[in-house]
Image: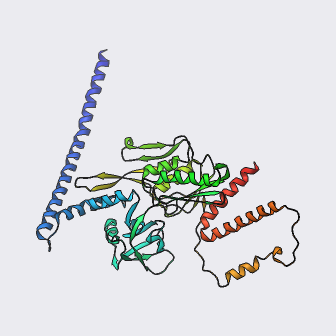
Amino acid sequence: MKKFVMAALGGTVAGALLTTQVAGPLVAQEAARKSSVYEQLDLFGDIFERIRAQYVEDVNEGDLIEAAINGMLTSLDPHSSYLAPKDFGDMQVQTRGEFGGLGIEVTQEDGFVKVVSPIDDTPAAEAGIEAGDFITHVDGESVLGLTLDQAVTMMRGPVGSDIIITVVREGIDEPFDVTITRDTIRLTAVRSRTVGDTIVLRVTTFNDQTYPNLAEKLAEEVEEAGGMEAVNGFIIDLRNNPGGLLTQAIKVSDAFLDKGEIVSTRGRDPQDGERFNATDGDLTEGKPIVVLINGGSASASEIVAGALQDHRRAIVIGTKSFGKGSVQSVVPLRGDGAMRLTTARYYTPSGRSIQSLGVSPDIVVAQPPRRPEAENEEEEAERFNRSEADLRGSLDNDSISEDERQQLLKEQQAAEDAADLRDEDYQLAYAIDILKGLNALGSEN
């Protein structure tokens, strides 16, 4: 018993000595670190006072502090920044779907402003701005060296005023200027239409209205088509959708899933991680889905595409998405401003991080450039599209009834409309063909 007690006591003493030996340097390191931080803050104060006292012109102390805060945040990553009171107010308005501007979502790369995507039916989209364009100058002034917020401020202005932006585009040798007239941007979160037996849901942004709009438009199109049994499938068009609210991306994903994880987020502290799961109920009642994405599909768009792809609920078609796999928290601050801080990465149900990689389509389909109209093209097409039925005195087909003949003509017209759509939007036409193929296979089994 004595030996056991002594051994235990010896172990306790040794443990105490070890703890003292390790803890001593750790305490010293922590003290040195805090001392260094205080010295740096003192240095900041010295520089601030020197600028205020000796700079060649009077300076606004508030502007200096804001610039310092913004510099600290923007040094972290392209999506962290300080929002002055007016900018914070503008951001809150944008999430409600109406604001003034050009209609482009931008980020920063290599010191220049990069277009993530133009927004549908806005001045930027109508002027031909494309995802991936670099903006190098605004009204002749270079944006190189400016923060993203500073560059965006240069592009803002009164509704109705013109702005000239200089654009560098891959595949074009020289920069070129584009004149855009600023306007009030009214975002329609979801547009819908029916092409043949396919319902197309064009989701342009993820704001407060996205899920309600989606559910409403989907129901309207299904009713107009004559019920779900008359629909062969759905296309969710997320091309050039720059993202938006995480909550809306979760709701939109949940609209097409009955169960399983939609997305998870992981911050620096593992305890801060969150998982979001689907609830029972699929608005499409299990119909086939194709999701369209491209390089302008970012953030919330990638959450939806990744969730439906991982659950094999949809076929993803198009080109690789933008690759913004980080989550920003907006924290209100004193003085009515706010801090936008990257606090987590998000992961698809299979555990993929999309950060810098994007969502890879199941089927890569590039949108070909529109070809110029050839001279006499219509005459050429008409000459080669003549058939036996166009010949004078040709015999009638007596093997089908008039109703069967009308049905055949209807199907031929649908095929011709599909061919026209390929010229207008090749990726969308390809997606519709995929759904037709899936339904043809299903009808044979």
Point out the image quarter for the N terminus.
top left
In the image, what residue occupies the spot 61% across and 67% down? Answer: 426
State which quadrant residue 159 falls in: bottom left
Estimate the x, y position of residue 140 in percent, counting from the top left: 35, 80
Q: Residue furthest left?
A: 53
Side (left or right) of 369 relative to 48: right
Residue 353 seen in the current view: no
State which quadrant residue 18 falls in: top left
Pick the residue in front: 406 or 277: 406
Pick the residue in front: 326 or 257: 257
Residue 400 seen in the current view: yes
In the displayed structure, 389 sits above or below 359; it is: below
Pick the residue in front: 84 or 404: 404
Estimate the x, y position of residue 348 in percent, counting from the top left: 50, 49
Side (left or right) of 172 relative to 434: left
Estimate the x, y position of residue 323 in percent, counting from the top left: 47, 59
Q: Residue furthest top?
A: 1
In the image, what residue occupies the spot 62% across and 46% down? Answer: 286
Q: What coloring was used for the rendering?
A: rainbow
In the displayed structure, 251 sits above or below 316; it is: above
In the displayed structure, 413 sits above or below 392; it is: above
